[in-house]
Structures are given as C-alpha cells and as structure tokens.
Image (cartoon, rainbow, N blue to C red):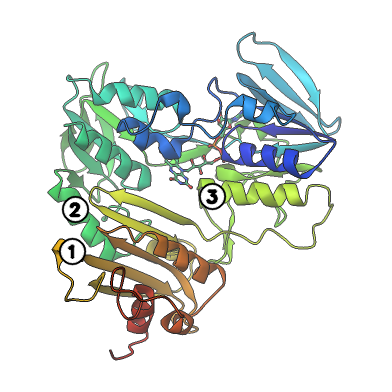
Amino acid sequence: TKIVIVGASHGGHESAIELLDKYRDVDVTIYEAGDFVSFMSCGMELFLEDKVTAQEDVRNFKPEDITSKGGHVFNNHEVTAINADKKEVSVKDVKSGQTEQVAYDKLILSSGVTPTVLPVPGHDLDGIYAMRGYDWASKIKAATTDDSIKNVTVIGAGYIGIEAAEVFTEAGKHVTLMDMIDRPLGNYLNENLTDVVTKELTSKGVELALSQSIKSFEGDKSVTGVKTADKTYPADLVICAAGVKPNTAWLSGTVNLTDRGFIDVNPYLQTNLPDVYAMGDAILPLSIPAGKPMPIALATTARREAQYVVDHIFEDTPAAPFKGVVGASALSVFDYHFAAAGLNTTTAAKVDVPVATSAYQDTLRPAYVPESAGNTDVYTSLTFDPLTHQILGGAVLSKYDITAQGNVIALAVAHKLTLEDLATADFFFQPGFDRQWSLLNLAAQHALGWAR
Ligand code: FAD
C-alpha cells in the first residue's frame, strides 16, 4: 500500500513512524515543502536562550530516522494538487521547479498553518517577524544579539508571544507585549491566574499594552513603531504571534474547507475525498469538554490524531470515531510555571459552553515549612459545568514546578469527572511535597464550598 504524507512536522512524523511500526507492506513517503526537515517550534525558546546543543538538533526527526525504517523523506518538495480521480498528487521539486505526478492509495494531510501578519498599513516593512519554523528561529536568534535593536514589540500575548517576550527581555531588550484583549494569556487562563502572570511580567520589565487595536506599522523601510488607537509604541523589531492561516490554499476546490480555511474532516478524520485524511493544526479537532470542534493547535493534538488515523487507515468506517482531545499545555512565565487543560472562561464563551469557575490559593506544603525550605504559594483555577459539576478545565500555577498536576486536570476533563470526584480522589500526602489533602482535592472542595 502506497501512503503519501504531506508535511514533515508532528502529524507527518507520528503518522510515518506509526505506519512503519504497525504494518508490513506499507510504502511510506513524506513530502516536505521546506528545506529543513521537522524543526520543533516547541523547542524554539530553549534554542533562543542557548539551552540546546545546536539549532540543527531542535527537530522531531532526521530523515535517516524514517529511511532506516524503510520510509522515504523528500524535503524541498511541495505537494501542489490532488487528483482524486486518478489517486495522484502533483509534487513540485522546489529547487528544480519540476512537477511530477505521484500515485497514492492513502493520503495523509498534515500541512499545518503559517503565522499571519496583521493586514494593516506597513505590514510588509522589514523587521516584522513571525515565530515558527527553522528560518524564523535563525532570524530571531540573530536579533537577540543585534545591538541596534533596543525596542521589541510582541503582538499577541498568548503562549508564543510570552515566549518571545521572555527571550528578548532576557536578551536585554525593552519589550512591549501587546494584545487586543485585556489580559496576557487571557485565552489560556482564568483571571485569578492572569493576575499573577500580569504582575510577574511587569516586575520583570515587560511593558504590557493591552486592549489595543493596531492601526499601522510605522517606518520607511524598516519598522520603527506600532501605532494603535492610543499611541505609537517604538519598535525596532516586531514579533507577530497573533494569528495563523491554515496551509490549505492548494486544496481549495478539491478538499472541503471551512470558511476560515481549515480542512473539513468527519469524526473519523476523513476528508470528503476517499482515502484522504487530515490532522494537526490544519483541522479543528473535537474538544472533549466543549463537545464540538474548536482550535486546539498543539503538537499533542496532532500526534493523537495521527495515531488514530494510522490505527484505522484500512477500515472504511472505523468502529469508533476519534475520541477528541482536551488541550493540555504548560509554560513558564519567568519565575512562574503553569499548566492548563480544557476550557477556560474565554474559550468556553467562544464555543458557547456555560461555565462556572473557582479560584483557590494555598501554600504548597504545610504552613510550618518555611519558604527557605521550599514552601511557596500555589494557585489553581477550575472551570466546570454549574449544573452537573463536570470539570471542563483547570490550571495550576506556582514558582514551584507543579505542572504535572495539569495532567491530573487533563485526565479529569477527558474522563468527565466531577468536582465531587476530584474533591475526594485519593492522592498522596507527604509534607516534603504537599498538604494533608492534595492541592487539587482542596481546589475541588473549595469549589464545592465544603468547609475546611
Ligand atoms: P506544522 O507544524 O504546521 O507543519 C506543517 C509542515 O507541512 C511544515 O513543515 C510545512 O512546510 C509543510 N507543508 C505545508 N504545506 C505543504 C505542502 N503543500 N507540501 C509539502 N509540505 C507542506 N505544541 C505543543 O504541544 N507544545 C508546545 O510546547 C508547543 N510550543 C510551540 C511553540 C511555538 C513557537 C510554536 C510556533 C508552536 C508550538 N506548539 C506547541 C504547536 C505545535 O508546534 C503545532 O501544533 C504542531 O507543529 C502542528 O503540527 P502539524 O503537523 O499540524 O503542522
């Protein structure tokens, strides 16, 4: 069976290894439009902060990892069209410009997304960067040591924007972190936690410019400022981390797309074309807590989808649909570390799911353990169905690394546990690590109003 995979990132990589490990007699070929195979953007901050061996090492896989298992990998090869009747794809060799027709029995699309620059005047000035993939990583790295760059404006205070703000602050630049909404990480965390994040960013010297509507980028050849409805923020460099566009223009007319250009898939991750599957950032996955598709652009999502597609690739209609994802993630914001899973007030509102929330703060360990012995504040937030108490999301945040608790919340959300389940769940106690009741027990008990 000849299987063609488009895109050599998380979805393409997981598909290839699962296919080669699980089946005999599969001929697997990955086509990647870019030159560098499988740069791992998730590891970009570590690279920018000099915490990895080399830029070339920040990748999901090397072509040899796949060819040694019998697969094929072609970089600089862009798939430009699908001819579903003949079951062929057109593949363009980007270097020579030549196009060939390649037959497939099964076709897997994991073409991902590209960051967008706001379509305002000045958007094509020099010095406006994105933060995704190998080439932007090289450019951003050079900018961190460029003394002519003093002011950096990061547009978008989501995960990627926070990473950029941290990188440039640590590189000694003055950073303005800008967003149209009124809280940093407001699409990821509830207000009690974004309050802590806001203080931390400000105390580390990041200038927050929130609730901003951007009117234009100023400058002649290179950007010199970002003009909003309020004022002009000086900027020698702009990092745009506020929006993406699915890499799907080449599919239009053959594969059904949503109005925003995402690949339309059924619950089995099949497209409208026979034997053509899609996954990763280019689709909207089923969110378990929302009960409907929504953007959850994570490597973890792409890999779970790839695993599902490969497991069922030889069935016309699999017995069970893709079970969906929770959307679990973690990040450091300078001295704090947080992990979040499922819905929060912002994302719940976007998908019309009514929620209640509860904020709980405590110390990590019993009060008699001093800060000098590692005791510190811990913060939690739970998002739940006000009627059934089903846990729909949550997050933990602290200077101590309690991010593993985020996976406990993720499991609770995935298995539709209630506050009552979490309030009484049997977790360990040891004063070297936590309280007599574990943090998430207490958070759920607090949400239920149980007296302690
Ligand atoms: P993508 O990674 O978007 O890659 C698609 C690939 O397809 C590209 O290489 C592209 O060149 C290629 N391609 C596109 N069109 C064609 C074509 N027509 N022909 C051939 N090739 C084509 N997720 C996490 O879970 N944890 C993290 O910590 C995390 N950190 C991140 C940090 C940053 C800075 C960024 C940008 C993202 C981060 N993510 C993280 C998200 C994660 O990187 C994405 O969810 C994941 O890469 C999506 O994988 P994908 O397979 O859908 O496609």
In the rendered structure, which amino acid carries the disc numbered 2?
Answer: Glu
> Which residue is at the far bottom?
451
Disc 1 to disc 2, C-alpha distance:
22 Å
CA gap between label 1 and label 3 equals 35 Å
**Residue matched to label 3:** 300
- Disc 2 designates what residue? 200
Q: Position of residue 101 (x, y in %)?
A: 79, 20
* Local SS, label 3: helix
- Indicate the quadrant containing the C terminus: top left, top right, bottom left or bottom right: bottom left
- Mark 1: C-beta under 8 Å from nearest atom of ligand 1: no
Question: Under 8 Å from ligand 1: the CB of mark 3?
Answer: yes
- Seen at 73% across and 41% down, the residue is 21
Residue at image coords 57%, 40%: 10
Q: Residues within 10 Å of mark 1 (few under 14, many from 20)?
A: few
Residue at 26%, 40% in the rendered image: 165
Observer-side mark, 1 or 2, equals: 1
Q: Which residue is mark 1?
A: 373
In the picture, the disc for residue 174 is: none
Q: Position of residue 185 (x, y in %)?
A: 32, 53
Q: Position of residue 2 (x, y in %)?
A: 82, 32
Badge count: 3
Mark nearer the N terminus (1 vs 2): 2
Q: Secondary structure at mark 1?
A: helix
Q: Amino acid at mark 3?
A: Thr
